[in-house]
Image (tube, rainbow, N blue to C red):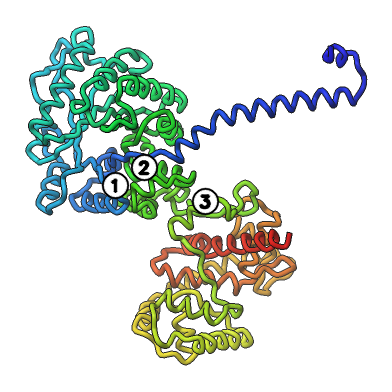
Amino acid sequence: IFKDYLNVSKSPFVNFVYRKMALSKVVANMKDALSAETHKRKKLRETELFVLDNSLRESTVGQLRGHTLENKWKIYEEVKKVGYQNIIVASFSHMTRLGDKFCEALAKAGEDFSNLYAFSEFIESIDKDRVPNIKKLPVGLEKMKQLGIRHAVIEFDIVYKGIDYTKFTVNDICALMKKRMDWCRSELHKESRVLFNIRDFSDAMRLKPESVLEVVKFLSSLPEHERPFAIIYEESGKNLPEELGVWTAAVRKVMDDNGWTEHAEKKGHLLVHVHEQWGLAHMTQMECIINGATGIWASLCEEGASMGHASSSIMLMNMIRMGNKKVLDQYKGCVKLREAAQNVTLITTGLPPHPKQPVYGERALDMVFGMPNFAPDKKEFSMAEFFGENPVMRMTTLASPQMVVDRLTNLFGKDPQFTLERAQAMLAKMLEDLRNGRKEEYMSKVGLAVLFDRAGGKLTGEMADAIAADKPRRLHINELLAEIRKMWDEWDLSDEVQGDDKLEFDSFYNGFLAPYFGCYRCDETKRALKAIDMDEDGSVDWNEFALYLKWAAHEYPDVKDAEELLSIAFRKGLIPAMQDVVLDQDSTNNNMA
């Protein structure tokens, strides 16, 4: 009746009420849909994650540079640094690979083999009639026995075109699985953990889902002590995350229905590995965890075959940012994830990660100012803080004597000379420099040591070493500063007033800030620039800007060129300082409110 009335009504009020009711219904439906999605965050926040590390294999596959035994050791140490205990160390074949030599080196070094794994094929060969030879033991298993590897990742296919599955049936697959597990527990170790990898999982779930689930049911139905350690599977990267979620949930249900649950005494592990192809890898990985996978097998970094894969570092950091405490207990070295992923990338490729690589790229910790959705917020998880990337303590005449003492102690350790009286003398020297128009940098080790010396202190050994090491680099540093000053002067030509050691905001933004700030004239951007004392008239002083450049040059002496020096000055010095300025101002405003 109301709709009929509306159709003939000319009343603007009636039209407004109806539109309001329609929008309210849309909002209500939206909230219902969102509430149905909350279980996803809850799952990622509350579940443990089993990580089977594959950095020694995955990150080196498909690389253009050869690898050495030394590379293997370096990767192995990075993996252990994070706290991963279950590590894939090799994939064996008829040829003697570097992995064979590495296993021998591990044994010689006395490494613990109780949590080391290796890959093996399920079948050794296939005859001309496309029937597998099930009597021949795969060479991978033979080598595991020779080299003392206890745990086997056995890879098989369900829809491989090279096999006639009318002759090699699902029942044959299941029988051979039982045979392989019995052999591993007899010949490798009585507690051998066997993991079966469904290598063509996604294709099989599309073409022969019943075959996949029959295999899963067989393994799940075995007596607890006869089951494998885990079912693992991989995705090529061509399917949607939601599709993998549905398939994972189906496998999980069959496992659970047959008593092989996540909470069983011998946990029903289901581990996923996702290749990158269309930018969906990490979301696919998370969707699988949400839908019943208990873990992942992956490298610390994304390097791998073809376009790479979903790494463990990004998966763990997503869980941590959502408040997951369990993974922090599982992997005590999570704070080293970023550093370890960077190092493994460098070891395997010879290059650092892409600067904008999430989590472990050079600029992954950048704060984006001037864009409300990306603005720094004390309530949100801070990745920079988690990884211990603290803002530079800016030493100015506004610092207290105690702040100066703290900075001296942080940089050089405890010393009887680091007193409040000496700190006061250093602050007095800073004021004297200011009155005399002398612009110095006091934030770095070198800058603070020189100030300490000028204020009457006796240089400690570490201070003297820092100053001595800096002297040979001064020419290079001065050349870089001169190059940046040349850029500054070129932008100064567009200012109304030139040659005053200042740049108007527009020029400074276009010349230096644009790569780091998302908004041109936002209030937040201008507030952030208080970190380098931008004047009320909107101009930026060269001497203030140069302080951060000098600090970056002193702290990162191996900097190669002006672009790298600018990048370090912004990422490591200015942007964290700007973040602090904005957060402090917001905190003050909130307290006043």
Quote the CA–CA distance across marks 3 and 2: 19 Å
Amino acid type shown at disc 1: Tyr
Q: Residue furthest bottom?
A: 456
**Residue holding disc 3:** 381
**Mark carried by residue 176:** none
Residue 357 higher or lower than 276, as above or below = below
Image quarter in which the C terminus is found? bottom right
User: Whole-percent x and y of residue 390?
Assistant: 48, 63
- Camera-nearest residue between 116 and 43: 43
* First of labels 2, 1 by sequence position: 1
Residue 226 higher or lower than 576, as above or below = above
- What crowding class fits label 2: few (fewer than 14 Cα within 10 Å), some (14-19), or many (20 or more)? many
Q: In the figure, is residue 111 to the left or right of 31?
A: left
**Residue holding disc 1:** 84
* First of labels 3, 2 by sequence position: 2
**Pointer 3 and pointer 2: residues touching (CB < 8 Å)?**
no
**Pointer 2 and pointer 1: residues touching (CB < 8 Å)?**
yes
Say what secondary structure mark 1 lies in: loop
**Pointer 1 and pointer 3: residues touching (CB < 8 Å)?**
no
> Is residue 386 in sight in this rendering?
yes
Amino acid type shown at disc 3: Phe
Amino acid type shown at disc 2: Ser
Quote the CA–CA distance across marks 1 and 3: 23 Å
**Residue holding disc 2:** 312
Q: How many numbered discs?
A: 3
Q: In the figure, is residue 44 to the left or right of 298?
A: right
